[in-house]
Amino acid sequence: MTLKLGDFGLATKLENDQEKKTTICGTPNYIAPEILEGKEGHSYEVDIWSLGVIIYTLLIGKPPFETKDVKTTYKKIRQNNYCFPEHIQISENAKSLIQIILNLNPLKRPSMYEILQHPFMVDVDKFPQTLPVYTLSVPYKERIGNKHSYSQNNLKANLLENGKINTDNNNNNFGNMRTQSIKSIPNNKNLNKQYSQQQNNNNQNQNQNLKNTNIAIQAASDIWVKQWVDYSNKYGLGYLLSNGSCGVFYNDCSKIIMDQSALFLEYYEKVQNQKQDKLTVYNINNYPQELNKKVTLLQHFRSYLESQNSDQGDGLM
């Protein structure tokens, strides 16, 4: 898979490698500090800085220096004031690459060749040639059973105690269980034989435990956005999911979702000074009068998105 990103709207040409530009222009979130200073001019290194901002944005979800106003953004850029959010996990290699790129001193930033040799770029799995269409909206993940049998999953014995799994607990997320990597061992026939026997015994025990369970373990179905429409200039953002549910993110930060049967509503209300929204579930025939407008808008969004989905089909990547 080949991914190319480009934005040449404000591109300029250098007549030689020693030339420096003094024009202050660029996209605020991605502009390099030497452009803002404008005293000694700037050169190729500003593109390296912007690349660091792009990498951060792709991994974290928003630019590192983004604020509500441009002046504050520029101040943070000049101070190189950014951080990695604790609730978003990224590798140490990723942090390292971003940190060496976002250097206030242009001469200390890595070259493109040095970036390509960085562990973050080298120590990665091979990129797939193609991806399912749902990856346009949600991260890619392999389903259990595609490449790994149940015997390979790290299912701990305490989950299978008494041969049953508590199906009332929706937090049992088997889709997140990862297979353990097998470390290399010395090339010794006796060791290999013992290791193989141990693995066979482990697999047999795990398979037996699975047979004793009263339910079949299945990975959760992947859900993605099939259609969306942006009316945020007036109402909000509406979307249609692959499972038939439809929702709207309103401009007042409230959210509403209608299930595929169109019988139930989930309404998420923003609560001041609270991190989590307040969730209330309603029947489509019994909800508060103050939600009339939002439910009506939801139904209009649903009708429009379903008609668009029927016209365009599902599509393939």
Image: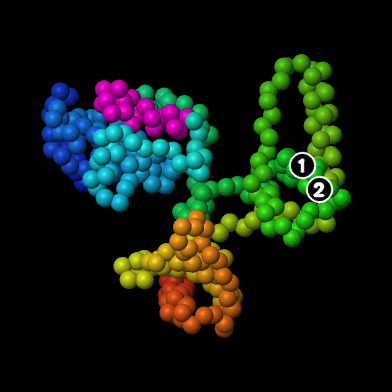
Q: Nearer the viewer, residue 309 or 206?
A: 206
**Percent position of residue 248, x then y:** 45, 68
Which residue in the protein does label 1 denote? 156
Q: Residue 244's image quarter?
A: bottom right
Q: Is residue 249 visible?
A: no
Residues under numbered marks 2 and 1 in contact, where contact means CB atoms less than 8 Å apart: yes
Q: Is residue 308 magenta?
A: no
Is the stretch drawn in magenta largely helix, strand or loop? Answer: helix
Q: Residue 31's image quarter?
A: top left
Please tell me whether residue 256 is drawn above or below residue 127 in the rendered image: below
Which residue in the protein does label 2 denote? 160
Query: What is the magenta range?
Result: 93-111
Q: Secondary structure at mark 1?
A: loop
Q: Secondary structure at mark 2?
A: helix
| Residue neighbourhood size for the residue with mark 2, other residues' Cα within 10 Å, grouped as few (<14), some (14–19), many (≥20) | some
**Percent position of residue 262, x then y:** 56, 76
Outermost residue on the front side: it is 273
The span from disc 2 to disc 1 (Cα, nearest Å) is: 7 Å
Q: Is residue 100 magenta?
A: yes
Disc 2 residue type (three-letter)? Leu
In percent of the image, x 36 and y 71: which residue is there? Answer: 235
Q: Is residue 292 visible?
A: yes
Residue 272 falls left or right of residue 230: right
**Percent position of residue 229, x then y:** 39, 67
In percent of the image, x 65 and y 49: which residue is there? Answer: 175
